Amino acid sequence: METPAGEARISWWDAPDAGCVLALGHGAGGGIEARDLAALAAALPANGVSVALVEQPWRVAGRKLAPAPRTLDTAWRALMPVLAESGLPLVVGGRSAGARVACRTALETGARGVVALAFPLHPPGRPERSRADELPLGQLPLLVVQGGRDPFGRPAEFPAGVRPVEVPEADHSFAVPKRAVPGQEAALTVLTDAVADWLATVR
């Protein structure tokens, strides 16, 4: 799909009897193959949710560094008519930088809510540089799913009004240590179940 920032790509996982569409963007350090995005795309169609994973133009073009937030937002906005053309309720979201994009633009998209995965509340070790003002608090339904060991913001660091779902032992990419109990598969199930249950309340 063409955008003012270049060609983007949308990959669809359609639900047979979809009740809504969840559009998710990737982070600044990777693409739609991220474990959390892949897990949601695999799990949610069985729950009546079609999943659209959006690759930003910089990734499609093979570049290694993400552009400025304004450019990311411009490309994301340009894709909204395509993501909404089914007429189903649209929920937007993403992981890390993709979550920031979805939060910053959510009110403009007509979305029913926002799913923020591994929201980078602040740079690692710099809690004074909070990005909490990007969260659409009190404006739209918001779900934050955060790893218990995320250096970009642990669940307890979020401001009043945000109660993240914690994935125990998980880091920013929702990876858990090999010694962790429960293990990696169970950690991702915490994430996918939380998103599925929340989506059922906002359609």
Image: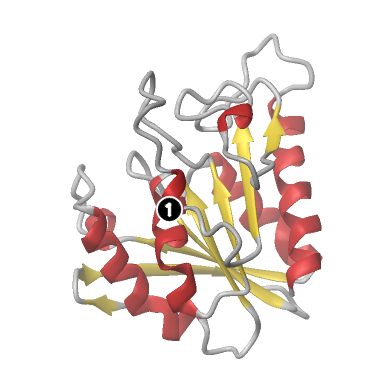
Q: Give the residue at x 19% y 69%.
A: 5
Residue 3, image quadrant:
bottom left
Q: Amino acid at mark 1?
A: Glu
Q: Give the residue at x 39% y 58%.
A: 101
Image: 145 above or below 122: below
Relative depth, front residue between 136 and 144? 136
Q: Give the residue at x 71% y 69%.
A: 49
Q: Position of residue 139 (x, y in %)?
A: 57, 67
Q: Position of residue 90 (x, y in %)?
A: 59, 76
Image: 51 above or below 123: below
Relative depth, front residue between 118 and 180? 118
* Residue 8 left/right relative to 151: left
**From the image, which quarter does the N terminus lie in?**
bottom left
Q: Is residue 30 visible?
A: yes
**From the image, which quarter does the C terminus lie in?**
bottom right
Colour convention: secondary structure
Label 1 crowd bin: few (<14), some (14–19), many (20+), radius 10 Å: some
As helix, strand or loop, the secondary structure at mark 1 comes to helix
* Residue 169 left/right relative to 197: left
Relative depth, front residue between 139 and 74? 139
Residue bearing mark 1? 134
Q: Give the residue at x 63% y 41%.
A: 160
